[in-house]
Image (cartoon, grey):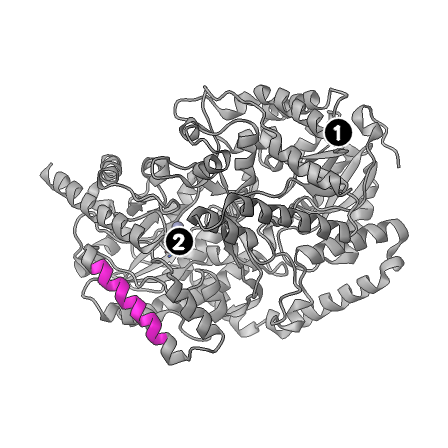
Amino acid sequence: MTLTHTGAARSARPFTATALGAPRIGPNRELKKAVEAYWAGTLDRRSLRDVAAGLRRDDRARMTMAGFDSVPTNTFSYYDQVLDTAVLLGALPARVEGVEDPLDRYFAAARGTAEIRPLEMTKWFDTNYHYLVPEIADETRFTLHPEAVLADLAEAVEEGVPARPVVVGPATFLALSKAAPGAGEPWERLDDLVPLYQQLLSLLRAGGAGWVQLDEPALVTDLDAAQLEKVTEVYGALTASADRPAVCVATYFGDPGPALEALGATEIDAVAVDLVAGGPGALAATTAFHDRLVLAGVVDGRNIWRTDLDGALGTLATALGSSGSLAVSTSCSTLHVPYSLEPESDLDPGLRAWLAFAEEKYDEVRVLADALRDGRDSRADAFDRCREALAARASDPRVRDMSLRGRVDALRSAGATRAPAAERAAAQRARLGLPTLPTTTIGSFPQTDDIRRARAAHRNGRLDDAAYTDAMRDEIRRVIELQERLGLDVLVHGEPERNDMVQYFAELLDGFATTAGGWVQSYGSRCVRPPILFGDVRRPNPMTVDWSRYAQSLTSKPVKGMLTGPVTILAWSFVRDDLPIADVADQVALAIRQETVDLQGAGLAIVQVDEPALRELLPLRRADQPDYLDWSVRSFRLATSGVSDATQIHTHLCYSEFGEVIDSIARLDADVTSIEAARSHMEILGDLDAAGFTNQVGPGVYDIHSPRVPAEGEIAELLREAVAAMPAERLWVNPDCGLKTRRDDEVEAALGALVAATGAVRGEVSGT
Ligand code: GLN
Ligand code: ZN
C-alpha cells in the first residue's frame, strides 16, 4: 500500500506489527539493582552503563524475535522518560546546574541531594507510573542535547534493527510541566520547542531512523480549540521540512477525539490510536487518517488479560476501512505490564491461560498482523487456543459468587451512615485526649534487610509460622519503642509484615492472584508487583487484627490500625475487565469494612484507610469524571462507615495534583486526612478550605521520597505556613507518606526533627 500525501512519507515504508514501548527495568529488575548499587557507591558508572546497554540490546532482540517490522527504541530510561526529555531539551532546573557530572545531575534532579530539592513527582496520566514534573522558568532557554537519543539509535542501526526512536512530544512535554514560581504557563513556550524538535528529527534521520514516534498522550485529555489549533500549527511546522524521517504521533490512554482532526490537518505520516481505552470513538476518529498509516492499538498495553483475538480482528477490519494502511500495535507502551509469563510457573494453570504479559502481547500483535494479511486461518491454532481460554474464564466458578454479590447489594442499598463530622470529632476528642498538633506517621517504617529476609524465609517455608510471628513482633516492638522514645502521639505498628500495601491484602483475599516476578516500574528504581484481581472478592479471615492488637498491647498511646482502601487496591492491581469496576470496588469495600469493625473490636481507637491512588484513577476526560468520583467516594464510605462515632477514621493521599479531586476528598468525610504537601508548600490547605472542608488534615512536612533529612527549622517553617492557612485545632503533623523506603537513621533523625519542630510551633500557637 502506498501513502498518497506529500512529505517524507513518500519514502517511508509502512510497517505491520509493533509495540508503542517496552518495560525497561529488566526481567529480573536488573536496572533497579544496578542503579541502586550505583547510588550506594558499590557499582561504578561503567558497569551501570553496561547493564543498561545489555537491557536495551535484549529488548531489541525480544521485539525482533516477535517479528516486529518496526521496533520502538529510546524506550530505555535510567529513571523516567519525562526527565530524559527535560535533559534532551535543556530544561533541567537551574538548581542542579552546579552538579558537574551529567549522570549525577540527572539523578540529583530526580532524587535530590543533601542541598538540592528534587523535582516534584506525579502520576503519568491515569497509570501507577510516576514521572518527574519539569519546572519551566521564564529564564529556561531550551537547547538540544540529543547525544543519548542518537547513541541509542546508533546501537539499533548497527544491529540492523528497524528502529523507530520514541521521544515525548512537545505538547505533552509542556502540558506535563509546571511553571516555576512566577513564570508563565509552560504551554506558551511551544514555539520555542519547535526548532529543537525539527533539529532532532533531522539528526535522527541522518542517524538512520526511517520513522520517529512522538508520544502525545496529552492529546487524549480535554484540549480547547486554541490548544488544538496550536497542535496543528506545531506539527505543521515539524513536518514542513523535507529533511526529516516519517513521523508517527502516538496518542494513548483514551479517545483522542478532535485531536485526531488537528493532527490530520498536518503532514504527519502515521498516528497511533488506543483502541482499547479509546473505544469506538477512537476507532471512528481514525477516518482523519484515511490516506496514512494507522497504528491500531488493539492489544492492551496496560492490563494483563489475554486479547480476544476474534474481537480484535473485527476491530482491525473496521479500522482498515478508514485508514491508508494499518499496523497492529499495543494500545500503549508495555511499560505498565511485566515482561513475561514464562517464569510464573506457580500461577494457577487455569488462570495463566487467561493472561498475556509483554512478551505474550508481542505474539498476539504478530498473530493479528498475520491474520490481517493472510486470513484468520493462517493462524488458526492461535485463534483456537484463545477461544478455549476465554470460554474457560467466562465459566469459572471463581469469577461469580452469588451469595457475596447479594451481601454487597444489601450493603449498597443500606448506604453509608455516620453521625455528622463535628459530633464524631467531639466523641473522638473525649476518647483520645490528644495534644494540639498531634504527631503521627503514615504507617510503614523502614523495611530492613532483616525484615525482608524473615518474610522471604517464611514464604519459602524455611521459617515456620511461630518463628515468623516472633520476628515480626520483635520488629513491631522495636518500632513502638522508637516512636515512644521520639515522643510521637499516635503510633503505628510499622507494617513489617507487608511486602506491599496492596499485595498484602491481595494475598489474604479470595479473588486475587499474585505473581512471583511480575514487576512493573512505579517510579525510578521502585518496582511493584500488582496482584491480579480475577474473581469475586471475599475476606475469608481477619487480615491485620493480630498485628495491630499486639502493637496496641505494648503502649498506652493510641495505635492506628492500617488498611488499604478499595480504590487503591483496584488502582494498584490488574483489574478484571468482565465486571464494571464500580461493582468490583464495592466488593473490596465490604471486605475492608469487615476488617475495620474487627479492628475496633480488638480495641483500636483509630483506623486509617489509605487511598493514595484516589487521584490516579480519575478519568482523563472531564465528562467521565463525575461517575468515577461517585463510585470511588461511595466505596470508601461503605468501607469506613461500619465503626462507631468514637472510632476515628483516617485516610491518606499522596503523589498527586489534588485540584480536580478536592471536592471528593471532602466527600470521603474521613475524620483525619493526611496528604502529601512538603514539595508543594502547603498549597493543599487553602484548596481544602476553599472546598468547604472542615475535618482535620495532616499536611506532610517531611518529603520521604528523598533521602534528605529535613532540618527542624525547615519543618517548623512548613508548620507555620500550615497554621497560617488552617486553625491549629484541625491540623496534624506527619510525613508525606510511609517510611518503608527510607533508612533507619534517616527516619530517626527526620522524625526527631518533626517532633521538635512541632513542640516549637505548639508553643507559638498556644502563646497567641
Ligand atoms: N500506610 C502506607 C505506608 O505507610 C501508605 C503508603 C502510601 O501512601 N503509598 O506505607
Ligand atoms: Zn502516601
630 to 393, vertically: above or below: above
Q: Farthest residue toward the left?
A: 767
Instruction: Give the number of the disc on residue 245.
Output: 1
Instruction: Give the number of the disc on residue 221.
Output: none
Earlier-in-chain disc, 2 versus 1: 1
- Residue stretch in magenta: 469-484
Query: Can residue 165 be seen here?
Result: no
Query: Can residue 608 be seen here?
Result: yes
Q: Position of residue 413 (x, y in %)?
A: 46, 62
Q: Position of residue 420 (x, y in %)?
A: 29, 53
- Say what amino acid the circle numbered 1 marks: Pro
The secondary structure that dominates the magenta segment is helix
Figure quadrant of the N terminus = top right
User: Depth check: 616 or 153 in front?
Assistant: 153
195 to 675, vertically: above or below: above
Asked whether, in this view, residue 161 is left or right of residue 144, the answer is right
**Residue indicated by mark 2:** 741
Measured in 3D between alpha carbons, the distance from the residue under mark 2 to the one under mark 1, in whole angstroms, is 43 Å
